[in-house]
Image: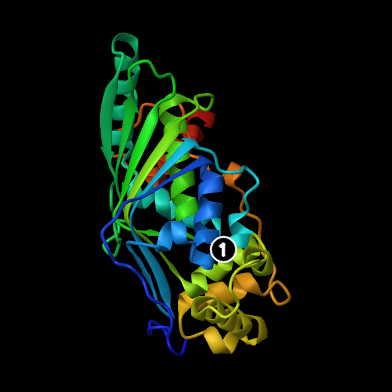
């Protein structure tokens, strides 16, 4: 896109070091409000410790409290991001070491019987050589005189539109794997930075119309004009115009329902399978366990 990452005239920011502290009822609400805050350049996020230009908006040192880890079971990753189930499988394979996860699960069961509080940390795996290791660690905590466990996520960096909602679902499924589906869990998330490229932020328009999101904003703002400019390019462009960059092409496909159909991929169907199988020590990744389980079931049938 022409002008990408160039300074927008009239757009000035205070880069003073600060911590942005936010609180939301659910993971779903956090994702919605953060995306709308970026699209609108909400002062709560951008008054200090943030920056934006013609291509990207960035907020540093973000702390988010989420009272309940919950992503809408009907949230459609297929429609919003044109993703297939392999995206979820890749995420699990890259970040989850099931040997470590099972150890945490076992330790928590033991401690819950005799301890009033605990803090156990899971360090995210990073199996892919080209992995960016955005997720660093998750600490599972039980605090004195509190019934709801807290999972504290530490993120190196978070792309807030097409990635953050996957991370929220991942931590929810990890919590369900460890505590069970009936246990409410609070999330405390700290991200060194959260960012959104204009193009990927516009994908939020597949979830909520851009016109509704930007209602009441200053139409003369350089940022709002830039957002509308890029949106118009997607609306009036052709696939050939965006074929040079994979991420731009994905955005184009998501924002053009007149040209494409989208296979559903609902949050309710994206799970971490839990069973009573005793897996070998070398069955660490999600795919390895699925293959082992498939062979085991085949042997039992024969």
Task: Using the image, determine if residue 43 lies above or below residue 8.
Answer: above
Residue 75 pos. (x, y %): 62, 50
Q: Quadrant of residue 253?
A: bottom right
Residue 85 pos. (x, y %): 54, 54
Residue 24 pos. (x, y %): 50, 42
**Label 1 crowd (10 A; few <14 / some 14-19 / many >=20):** many
Asked if residue 56 lies left or right of residue 257, the reply is left
Asked if residue 111 lies left or right of residue 266, the reply is left
At mark 1, the secondary structure is helix
* Residue beneath disc 1: 81
Q: What residue do we see at 49% from left, 74% from top?
A: 198
Residue 139 pos. (x, y %): 30, 35
Task: Using the image, determine if residue 140 lies above or below residue 47.
Answer: above
Asked if residue 162 lies left or right of residue 279, the reply is right
Task: Using the image, determine if residue 6 lies above or below residue 290.
Answer: below
Residue 269 visible: yes
As rendered, which of 301 and 225 lies closer to the eye? Answer: 225
């Amino acid at each position: 896109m022409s002008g990408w990452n160039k300074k927008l005239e009239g757009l000035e920011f205070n880069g003073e070091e600060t911590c942005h502290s936010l609180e939301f009822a659910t993971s779903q609400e956090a994702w919605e409000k953060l995306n709308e805050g970026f699209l609108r350049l909400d002062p709560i996020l951008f008054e200090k410790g943030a920056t934006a230009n013609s291509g990207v908006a960035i907020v540093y040192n973000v702390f988010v409290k989420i009272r309940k880890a919950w992503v809408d079971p009907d949230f459609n990753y297929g429609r919003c991001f044109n993703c297939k189930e392999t995206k979820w499988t890749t995420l699990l394979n890259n970040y989850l070491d099931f040997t470590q996860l099972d150890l945490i699960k076992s330790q928590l069961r033991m401690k819950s019987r005799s301890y009033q509080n605990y803090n156990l940390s899971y360090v995210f795996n990073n199996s892919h050589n080209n992995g960016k290791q955005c997720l660093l660690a998750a600490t599972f905590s039980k605090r004195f005189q509190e019934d709801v466990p807290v999972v504290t996520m530490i993120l190196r960096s978070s792309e807030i539109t097409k990635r953050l909602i996957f991370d929220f679902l991942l931590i929810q499924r990890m919590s369900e794997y460890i505590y069970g589906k009936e246990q409410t869990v609070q999330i405390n998330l700290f991200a060194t930075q959260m960012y959104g490229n204009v193009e990927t932020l516009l994908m939020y328009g597949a979830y909520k119309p851009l016109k509704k999101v930007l209602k009441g904003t200053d139409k003369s703002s350089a940022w709002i004009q830039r957002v509308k400019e890029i949106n118009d390019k997607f609306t009036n462009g052709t696939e050939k115009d965006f074929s040079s960059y994979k991420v731009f092409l994905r955005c184009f496909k998501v924002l053009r329902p007149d040209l494409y159909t989208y296979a559903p991929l609902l949050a309710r169907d994206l799970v971490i399978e839990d069973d009573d199988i005793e897996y070998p020590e070398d069955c660490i990744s999600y795919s390895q366990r699925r293959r082992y389980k498939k062979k085991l079931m085949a042997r039992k049938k024969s």
